[in-house]
Amino acid sequence: MSELSKVAYQVMWNRLISIVEEQAQALVRTAFSTSVREAGDLSAGVYNDKGEMLAQAVTGTPGHVNAMAESVGHFIHRIGRQNMFEGDVYITNDPWEGTGHLHDITVVTPSFHKGRFVGFFACTAHVTDIGGRGFGADANSVYEEGLYIPIMKFAERGQVDRSLVHIIRGNVREPDQLVGDIYALATCNEVGHRRLTGMMDEFGLADLDGISDFILSNSRAATLERINALKPGTADGHMRIDGYNTPIDLKVKLTIEKDRMFCDWEGTSGVDKKGINVPLAYTKAYTCYALKCAIAPEIPNNAASLAPFQIAAPVNSIVNALHPAPVALRHVIGHMVPDTVYDALDKLLPGLVPAEGAGSLCNFQISLRPRTDAPAPPDAVRAEVLTFNSGGAGARPELDGMSATAFPSGVMTMPAEATEQVGPVIIWRKELRPDSGGAGKRRGGLGQYMEVGAREGHEFDISAMFDRVRHPARGRRGGEPGAPTTIGLDDGTAMRGKGRQHVPHGRKVMMAFPGGAGYGDPKDRDPSEVRRDLALGYITPEHAEAHYGLSRDEIDAILRRARAGEAF
């Protein structure tokens, strides 16, 4: 290959990345669900004609994209190449051939250029409702969790399957939102297709074979170079988390060897009775993501850059649950996978990975209805409101943890205003939680306080999806743990961290989301950073005294200066 062609291919590679980012932004702009529009719980990617991912959008979550990387192969198998036509759109929410649970709709569109099939665009979005019990952990099998859409055609040669649309509308609580989201998914693939064919015309390409070979060969070589520069070795990682009724143990054996990093989840807890189980594709997605973030973060994600990170998991373990296991909250366990991997990686590559963070998103769904304990006002309505929230991230070897930030999922916290405009819900409080970040040379990120209720005349059920209630994030290298999750009613009634629970008319749910753990001995923290944290309200005087050794006189002086507006 000449230097000129290498430069041209690099330009095309960059163009593909920008194309899928535009694809993702088109989905954000046109989606109906707040989980997509406000939180960015989506993915977008372009694939060659073999179904290998060439580029993914920066906007999105690795649980979707890295799982979706495998799903296109399932579409090829189920639909059949001989049945793929220009103008087709394919759809599924199969947890085992899509991205892990029924609430994710994956749409795949074949791309044709001048009548020739050249590749695929695919995208995924989390939808507010899919029927069944609703978004929560309470189901005993996947059949209870909602409407199942096998891999099939949503449209053939440009004609939408109206019977499928009627079936979907008849089985979900928010039909306008869901059907709107499906059209948004199809539209964003069309945006990607138009940009791709424009690029092919510009560069005179008849197919994607050349650019595909360039991307995949260079990505694989760059990733293997990073892996082979590491010292070979094996280490074990372990994390215990809340589970549903009983604790869950995640165990992994990580091996660094020539040309690959291998994770074996042998010893991990078995399938749970409730909907917190994880299909293998989702476990693979977050295992690969953890390793790639640590080893080769700047190499773009595609089939070849992910391939050297390999995993195995015992069948019917909680990280390799088979049909018909309930899987609605697979993210609660799956988001803990990276920190478990890092427990092992820290033993092989000390000083590289962060302390544990909140891990799983602090999500909850509210099912609102007119009050039943007394006459409801005529304007009372039913509504489903889903909100994504985050605890604190773990402290890093050289930086404090990020507050109210979702790692590893990467989705954004929803604004209170966006949540309140989709239903009769009131966010009474949403603010950072002082003292929730674990003490250390580097402090863990802060969690959040939230207080949630309903407008007058409504009662609601809340589906809690929390962890870290009994097992807070653990510090690393002498760092202290983050604060645990708490949840209860405003009258002091305790509530469970997971499951659907009734909230009577007039009551509020009081939540405190977990903090990230600290990194390094708190005695080694720069005193100026402790003073800054105290002045900004990230830590209280009691915390500063107990964990960092500040005297009462020092504390009083710092607070006086802060009230006076003096800089720190």
Image (cartoon, rainbow, N blue to C red):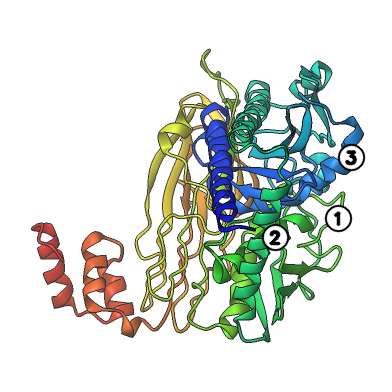
Q: Is residue 282 left or right of residue 528?
A: right
User: Quick one: label 3 or label 2, which is nearer the N terminus?
Assistant: 3
Are there few (<14), some (14-19), or many (20+) residues within 10 Å of tag 3? few
> Is the residue under label 2 in contact with that under label 3 (CB below 8 Å)?
no
Q: Marks 3 and 1: which is nearer the front?
A: 3
Q: CA distance from mark 3 to mark 2?
A: 24 Å
- Residue drawn at x 67%, y 33% is 129
Q: Amino acid at mark 3?
A: Arg
Residue density around tag 1, few if under 14, some if 14–19, many if 20 or more, within 10 Å: some
Residue identifier under label 1: 322
> Mark 3 or mark 1: which comes first in sequence?
3
Q: Does any portion of residue 242 appear in the rendered image?
A: no
> As displayed, is residue 175 above or below residue 251?
above
- Image spot of residue 462 (x, y percent): 59, 41
Residue 143 appears anywhere in the view? yes
Q: Amino acid at mark 1?
A: Leu
Q: Residue drawn at (56%, 80%), measured in percent from left and top?
A: 346
Disc 2 to disc 1, C-alpha distance? 27 Å
The residue tagged with tag 3: helix, strand or loop?
A: helix
Viewer-proximal residue, 19 or 154?
A: 19
Q: Quadrant of the C terminus?
A: bottom left
Q: Which amino acid type corresponds to the residue marked 2 in the rendered image? A: Ala
* Residue 157 vs residue 237, the one in the foreground: 157
The image shows residue 378 at horizontal and vertical percentages of 53, 12
Inter-mark Cα distance, 3 to 1: 19 Å
Q: Which mark is residue 304?
A: 2
Is label 1 in a helix, a strand or a loop? loop
Residue under circle 3? Answer: 78
